[in-house]
Amino acid sequence: MRFFEQMVAVLILPPFFLGIIAKTKAAFAGRKGPPVFQLYYDLSKLLNKGAVYSETATWIFRLGPVLSLAALFIASLLVPLGGLAPISFSGDAILFAYLLGMGRFITIAAALDVGSSFEGMGASREATFSSLTEPALILAFAGLALATKNFSLSGMFSLPIGRALGAGTTLAMGSLLIALLAENSRIPIDDPTTHLELTMIHEVMTLDHSGPDLAFILYGSAIKLFLMSALIVRLIVPIPTGAAAWAIWYGAMIGISIGIGIIESSLARFRLLRVPQFLIASVCVAAFAVILILR
Amino acid sequence: MTHILLVSFGFLAAGAVFSVILRGRLAKVAVLINLSLGCLMGLIPALRVLTGGFIAQFHAAWPVPLGEFSISLDPLSAFFLLLICVVSLSCGVYGEGYLEASHGRLPLPAVRFFYFLLTLSMAMIVCAQNAVLFLAAWEMMALSGFFLICAEDQKPAARRAGLLYLICTHIGTLCLFALFALMGSKAGSMNFTAIKTILVNFSTLGLNSLFALALIGFGMKAGFMPLHIWLPEAHPEAPSHASAVLSGVMIQMGIYGLLRFLFLCPSIPKAWGFIFLIIGVSSGIFGILFALVQRDLKRLLAYSTIENAGIISLGMGLGCLGISYGNNTLALVGFTAAILHALNHGLFKSLLFLSAGAFYQALGSREIEGAGGLAKTMPLTSLFSWIGAAAICGLPPLNGFISEWLIYYGLIHGGTIGRARYAIFCVAGLALISGLAMACFSKAYGALTLGKARSQIVQNTTDPSKLMILPIAFLAISCLAIGVIPGPIILFAARSSAIVCHIDFQSSISALATPMTQANFIGILGAALLGMAIILWFWRSMKLKRQKVSLGSTWTCGFISPTPRMQYTASSYAQPLARVFEGLLQPKIEFHPSVGYWPKRSSFRSDTPDPTLDRFLLPVFISIKAKLVLFRRFQRGRLQYYLLSVFLFLIALFLWKL
């Protein structure tokens, strides 16, 4: 039953939260912005379109969107949304991180497949930034695992409210927030709305995909943001059991999306040379979190 | 059962003889038959021992003083014998196709002979129970490696690489001689059983000095960081099937030696575990960083071998910490991860070297930069190289992930035990290593196989012959199989690690029960990942059947007239990451900008010399030589000066005796 509820939630909810982020950014800019359900309309339109493939591309280009979406679906089985995750075992946090890594690897390969300088640049920058983000993510997981003496995602993210406000876990949460911004191509690391040279990281890797492939990619990025926000929600808000649980969870997720929208609207994208320094700083923050938790 | 082992040795020796005596097609058939029979018969006792069987020791007298031809197979030896047989057989079959396609560039009898000697000596190393036999087989392995590296000895680069390899391996062997001499002299006999009993009486200082000797001796072969200088020079020069065995299996002989030494030690001081962890993280990070900036495919793979040796050392460090702190789970998890990663590395590294050989023969050069678009002309080779690349990055559902996951598991669970909790910072190191590996291998295989062809050579390339493709395919499928069904292999590795930890097998199974069930879960989820990908692929094809699908030129938001030179090259792909780690890499850049108002010729060259060899050892040796030149004053070349110095020396001796 839990499995079924989780799959339904992961299938239906993610595009909604991207819509909330877009609405928040529009409110800051004084616009009305696109409808909250815009991504649903886009996905259904794209799924019914044909596709144009580049002559330079091979089977890797066609495999990219499929394998990364499949990796995200499997990763979603490990993430605890309201209660426990459907599949939870000690060490599944590492599997989660590496499934995201698998999706990233095949997307980079698909980007290099078309033989264009834009996608090559995006792939190069993505490889750089993700290799600096992974230590932060996994150190934060390690710190939380030490704090809760439990190495599964469901166990790690079930801190009682008092422990969750401790110094170590707050630092770990900060590091996770930076990892969320980096992995999901949010400002201040990347701009999700443009693919121009200044912000040529994630969006540009998918320039040549069309039709259902593009739908898979947009949907996959919505799922990734949804999963990582769900993890941060679990750290901030204790989830009571019972009927109020879902309402509190939805409220917290909408709150996180609005928060991400606020961060995106109040910061400018960092100079490209500063981004690695920022990511290394987040690794240091996670290391401090582990030191504090170890004592 | 032991007789089957001896028969397999016999077949390997016979193969060596046949490869020298016979010529032409008959030689190829004889080599293939002997290699297959030798390796397959070696597999039988190995599997028997790994599944819980027991085979008797074999003793024979040997005229060498203190030496005894005693061999036996315990699970630790059996696991490494399994690795040797599987990889040597695949690479040997590939080698026949490779030698055929090399059209006389390589000396066929020599390469075949030394390949058989290499396999035979490695099999004897893991079975040896007597230190003299061990050292004899070790030296035979080192020399066969030397002759394989110098196979193309008309090239100065190959000669230089061979000489460097020979010097380094003999430094290691010297330390091993000292090690076994110290242990054997106290014990009065060179048999491992006698040594094991006598080591109990050694003081801590004695054990620590033995450990230092073992670390240098075996670490030189395993490729740990400051001792790695021969690896990036030697492995590219050997013929590709020999490089695959050198990198995939010979490295693991160093690891086997360290594990055997740890098995012989009665207790393990806490410092050893931390030393292994530090070596592991530094070898891993330096190895993959230097791999990232290489332009030569095989040199890149050689540096990546250093990285994987670092990961294995991380596992061994965890195991040592577990033994020192008395925690059975940590010890077993650590050693199982190290031993399993040794097997996994053997499989995917040999896969990558074999496909690198195919690319080298097709393109005529080992450079990554000049190719591109090989996925269209050499589809099978590219497919299997991508599987190997994903495996070496440790991505699910392949086998690299299983061993790396076990190391993460050990690191986090060690976080609850005494001082060992400081090991948890290695988690960041391992994650960084994985991320850098992803960047490095996507660079190498992206520049080689994807995109548009950057030069004309690519047009005439085709997939290599069946003899070369079948072993590559077999290795790729085995990587996938271990990733999806890890259970049996982890059981084998657990049996071997139980030997090193001095725990009996039943209690080790109960200690490892949790990680093993979870590894099976991971395998199932990996299979689910592949299944889900297949479902999505078919759903997409169904959706696209009713729509219009067409081919066009690359869109990229209005690319008007694309040329292959507009693509990212491998060096430019790695440049942002190389700049972040500039402090560690210290690249040498020669840049001649064009001066003046009108653009003239300008040139740019960047190189990343190896830090230990080119920036430390060479300057040190040059300065030592400069100081020693002062002693040339004594060599005047005239007989009178020499007679005078002898006379003065005699007078000095008399005065001293007075």
Image: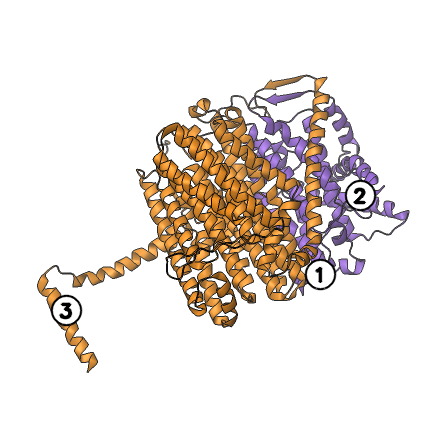
Chain colours: A purple, B orange
Q: Are marks 3 and 1 on the same chain?
A: no
Name the residue tied to disc 1: A167
Whether label 2 touches label 3, CB < 8 Å: no
Marks 3/1: CA–CA distance: 77 Å
Residue B506, given in percent of the width and then of the height, sits at: 68, 57
* Residue type pointed to by label 3: Val
* Residue type pointed to by label 1: Ala
Query: B492 or B429, which lies in front?
Result: B492
Looking at the rendered structure, the secondary structure element under dot 3 is helix
Q: Residue B72: in sight, yes or no?
A: yes
Query: A64 or B252, which lies in front?
Result: B252
Q: Are marks 2 and 1 on the same chain?
A: yes
Residue B293, given in percent of the width and then of the height, sits at: 46, 42
**Quarter of the image holding residue B160?**
top left
Name the residue tied to disc 2: A254
Q: Nearer the viewer, mark 3 or mark 1?
A: 3
Which chain is indicated by disc 1? A
- Residue at left offset 39%, top offset 40%: B16
Looking at the rendered structure, the secondary structure element under dot 2 is helix
Which chain is indicated by disc 2? A
